[in-house]
């Protein structure tokens, strides 16, 4: 009988030691990181997405399609940053593509729709039969204007053979006016109907 009691006491002591070791191991191996107690850093994106394919729809019709390798969204700053992106703008209730483009980077102001595209910009507007190549373009959505940096080289091409190069482009797409701040060279082909 004494042997049985000794064995039970030994089992209880072993179990208690095992629980104690498990508790110590768990206590020292688990940590909780609640982050910094400082205010949120507005330089950190609220959302990061990779390999994005986004279609904007209005009244059940696709308006635009944007594809990007990386998208970062900053809610407090009201800003989205895109890397290696391309876009298509649709017309005719989504039946046709009337503009396409691409750039290495872009910053989009969410509220205004203003876009700064840089690191190699390529735009093609089918309805105007025009292709624009430059390093940087700033689009102001409400005014429907675009401009390059004052020293940025801009090349404009048309299917009819027109090739124009200049620096400091300013364009008003509503009025269909174009002007350059610097010297302009190239060939303009006039087609008389």
Image (spheres, rainbow, N blue to C red):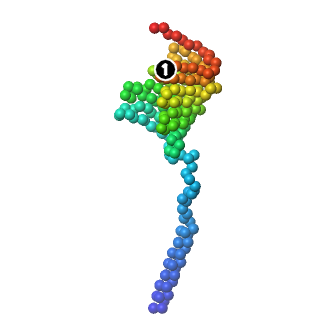
User: Which residue sits at x=53%, y=43%?
Assistant: 77
Residue linked to disc 1? 175
Residue 72 picture location, percent across and down: 52, 42
Quadrant position of residue 83: top right
Residue 85 picture location, percent across and down: 52, 34
Against 67, residue 27 (above or below) is: below
Against 115, residue 181 (above or below) is: above
Lateral position of residue 92 relative to residue 176, left or right: left
Can the viewer see residue 143 in this picture? yes
- Nearer to the camera, 92 or 77: 77
Can the viewer see residue 69 in this picture? no
Question: The N terminus is located in which quarter?
Answer: bottom left
Residue 34 picture location, percent across and down: 54, 59
User: Which residue sits at x=56%, y=13%?
Assistant: 188
Furthest residue in direction top, as rendered: 192
- Nearer to the camera, 34 or 27: 34
Query: Circle 1 — which element?
Result: loop
Furthest residue in direction bottom, as rendered: 1
Residue 27 picture location, percent across and down: 55, 69
């Amino acid at each position: 009988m004494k042997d049985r009691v000794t064995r039970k006491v030994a089992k209880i002591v072993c179990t208690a030691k095992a629980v104690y070791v498990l508790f110590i191991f768990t206590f020292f191996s688990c940590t909780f990181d609640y982050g910094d107690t400082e205010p949120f850093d507005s330089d950190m994106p609220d959302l990061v997405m990779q390999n994005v394919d986004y279609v904007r729809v209005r009244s059940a019709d696709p308006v635009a399609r944007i594809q990007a390798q990386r998208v970062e969204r900053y809610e407090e700053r009201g800003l989205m940053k895109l890397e290696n992106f391309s876009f298509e703008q649709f017309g005719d209730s989504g039946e046709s593509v009337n503009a396409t483009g691409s750039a290495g980077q872009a910053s989009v102001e969410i509220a205004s729709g203003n876009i700064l595209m840089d690191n190699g910009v390529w735009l093609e507007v089918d309805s105007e039969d025009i292709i624009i190549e430059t390093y940087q373009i700033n689009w102001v959505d409400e005014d429907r204007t675009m401009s390059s940096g004052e020293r940025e080289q801009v090349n404009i091409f048309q299917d009819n053979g027109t090739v124009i190069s200049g620096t400091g482009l300013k364009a008003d797409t509503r009025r269909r006016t174009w002007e350059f701040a610097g010297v302009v060279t190239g060939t303009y082909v006039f087609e008389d109907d």
